[in-house]
Amino acid sequence: MRFAPAVLSLVKGRDFRDLVGCFAMNENGNAALFLDLAGTLVTIDETRSIYHDACGHLKIELLPNVAEKLAPMRDHLMLVVTNQSGINRGWFTMAQVEDAMRELDHKLGDILTGWQICPHVPDDNCACRKPKAGMILELAELYGVDLRNSTMVGDQDVDEQAATAAGVGRFIYAQEFFGWD
Ligand SMILES: [Mg+2]
Ligand SMILES: [Zn+2]
């Protein structure tokens, strides 16, 4: 299967094969935890976007229980897939979103394996913007992910739709996964 490449960033250039002994692996590949970003890992404003200032700097503020819940899972493949149409809207740049991702990884204790960022607006008709499956499929190919045995956590229906379209075995809403009341 081919799809238009989204923008891919790998955390620190870490070679995922170093991790192979640490997480569940079977003949189909590795189970992964796919994570949405805004409203799932970090706080959002009233427009459901991550708050950014006039210079395009994004404010990374962890939501409750996120660091505590993810810390024990640090040996699993943890892959963030995020729609960031603010890039193509001119609110901030890809580099600023990548800076925000590195800040997030640092605040989580250096546990993220990688991420993918869709910079497109709906009219761009890309293959990566959720609810499409492009970002998940691309990461799955790169990391040899067994999608059936993988889980996606998100806060919106588009996250569930993207997970379903990609063949991810399980979807859990962030509210439930992180135990928010
Ligand atoms: Mg979200
Ligand atoms: Zn896209």
Image (spheres, rainbow, N blue to C red):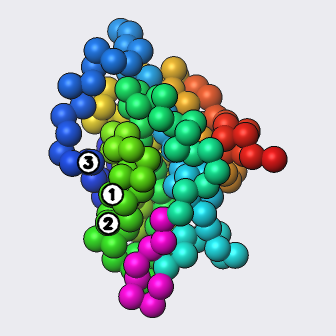
On the question of residue 159 being in view, the answer is no
Q: Which residue is mark 3?
A: 10
Highlighted range, magenta: 53-60
Q: Residue 96's quadrant in the figure?
A: bottom left
Reply above or below: 24 against 6: above
**Amino acid of disc 2:** Asp
Q: Secondary structure at mark 1?
A: helix
On the question of residue 26 being in view, the answer is yes
In the displayed orientation, state which residue is furthest to the right.
Answer: 181
Q: Residue at x 38, y 10 (%)?
A: 26
Q: Which residue is mark 1?
A: 102
Q: Residue 7's quadrant in the figure?
A: bottom left
Reply above or below: 72 against 4: above
Label 3, residues with CA under 10 Å away: few <14, some 14-19, many ≥20: some
Mark 2 or mark 3: whose residue is earlier in sequence: 3
Q: Residue at x 55, y 39 (%)?
A: 68
**Amino acid of disc 3:** Leu
Instruction: Give the left or right position of residue 49, taking residue 88 as reference.
Output: right
Q: Residue at x 42, y 53 (%)?
A: 107
